[in-house]
Image (cartoon, rainbow, N blue to C red):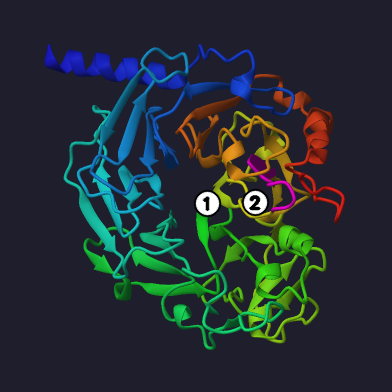
Amino acid sequence: MRLFYYLFITLVLFSCSKNLELIFDDDNGGLFLPEGFQSLVVHEGVGQSRHIAVNENGDIYVKLRLDYGRNGNVALRDNNGDGKAEITKRFGDYPNDGRFATEMKINKGYLYYSSERVIYRQKLNPKKLVPDSPVEVILTDPFPIRWHNAKSIAFDNENNMYVTFSGFTNSCEDMTKGYDDPMATVLGRYPCDELELLGAIWKFDKNKLNQKLTDGEKFSTGVRSVVGISWNDYTNELFAVNHGRDYLHNHAPKFYTEWDNTVLPSDEFLKISKGDNFGWPYTYYDHFKSKRLVAPEYGGDGKKLASIKYREPIYALPAHWAPNDLLFYSGDMFPERYKNGAFIAFHGSTNRSPYPQAGYLVGFIPFKEGLPLGDLEIFADGFAQVEVIKEMKDAKYRPMGLAEGPDGSVYISDSKKGKIWRVAYTADKSSFTDENLKEMELRKYLPHIKTPIEFQDIVK
């Protein structure tokens, strides 16, 4: 009888994971999507959160954004196959130590998640929603809590785990210099002492317990703040999205206007190989000039090109949109143009004043032979629920996490309330053309997406 019971439960869970009777929301949960796509709200809000993961049986795991207490994870299950999560459980036998606690990923039957300082894992039990295995410590950060302290991770096809150790300043600035004159340039520390260990991607053994930073290998350097990092199984390479620096006008007002401050520099989509140096904090990438320029803290004036050959992005993203997650689509549900392409969750800007804030959407970049093919497309919009975002607080939701479900649908999470959407394609894949994207292309003219016109698009 016990064996029959377990077989019955397994069959029920498997049938639920297929989700053949999804009940989509009439308004797509408030989202605007390309023609042929529909979405539903899986959960109205599990609490302020960061990244998400979806198991092969459809169970969802969410990393909460907490700096106190315990139980910093949430598990959700759709029990009847309609796409909504009927079961929600908190878990996590570890101390929450900071609001940049970010990661939630599944790899080879293990659930990996991070606080700000520690990466943990638990073995998943296929019979249970919440893992009951011991919480194992994989890596501990030796430094105290600091800015940009997300521990995002990616796994290659061997036993390696790549971890972000971002810089904790904007441009390694020396805040004791450059303020004597209101028009003076803030100076940077040279050499930047953060680069010894931070501003980097490190590689570790994903199965080795209780590692410290020096047990790993510094894989690449010169990245300011990486939250979204992913291994591309199709090309067998590491990719990441990097937050560009801020405050060009604030730090060097004689060289940069407030408009420059808003539209520069690029956030960067990076392909990362061992030994790569992407130039932070000494340089920044100007996507209008398609050049890497010297940062003002190190003698730049908005025109001077970097003399050292640093690696450039494979795609220059809009300034300050805050790309916070990266997903390479491997499913078969979506039309062929999406296969192996990159979805990016743009958390949205906070510092483009006096111009509108921008981003707050999920974008898509088609790929061919491992590189971007074509321009950034608007895949999902409407999270902010306002078109002109004066300040971040005006946006109701901010897209944060991305995950692919076992059927090929894409899950999107919000950081403010922990709302979760599920996006599926429900039309004929073979009929999908550029015409299906026409309405989304028009959204590029909205204030929270378009490049503002200097002196004309200032928010009153």
Q: State the quadrant of the N terminus.
A: top left
The residue lying at 71 percent from left, 51 percent from top is 368
Q: Could you tell me what secondary structure mostly forms the magenta stretch?
A: loop
Residue labelled with disc 1: 233
Left/right placement of residue 199 relative to residue 449 reads left
Nearer the observer, 415 or 216: 415
Q: Which mark is residue 321?
A: 2
Q: Where is residue 83 drawn, in percent x and y?
A: 47, 18
Nearer the observer, 17 or 224: 224
Q: Where is residue 396 drawn, in percent x and y?
A: 57, 33
The residue lying at 61 percent from left, 51 percent from top is 350
Of the residues tagged 2 and 1, which is closer to the observer? 2
Q: Where is residue 326 drawn, in percent x and y?
A: 56, 49
Kind of residue at disc 2:
Trp
Indicate the secondary structure of the residue bearing disc 1. Answer: loop
Q: In this rendering, does residue 344 appear at all? A: no
The stretch of residues the image draws in magenta is 353-364
Nearer the observer, 212 or 127: 212
Residue 446 on the magenta span: no
Kind of residue at disc 1:
Asp
Q: State the quadrant of the C terminus.
A: top right
Q: In this rendering, does residue 262 appear at all? A: yes
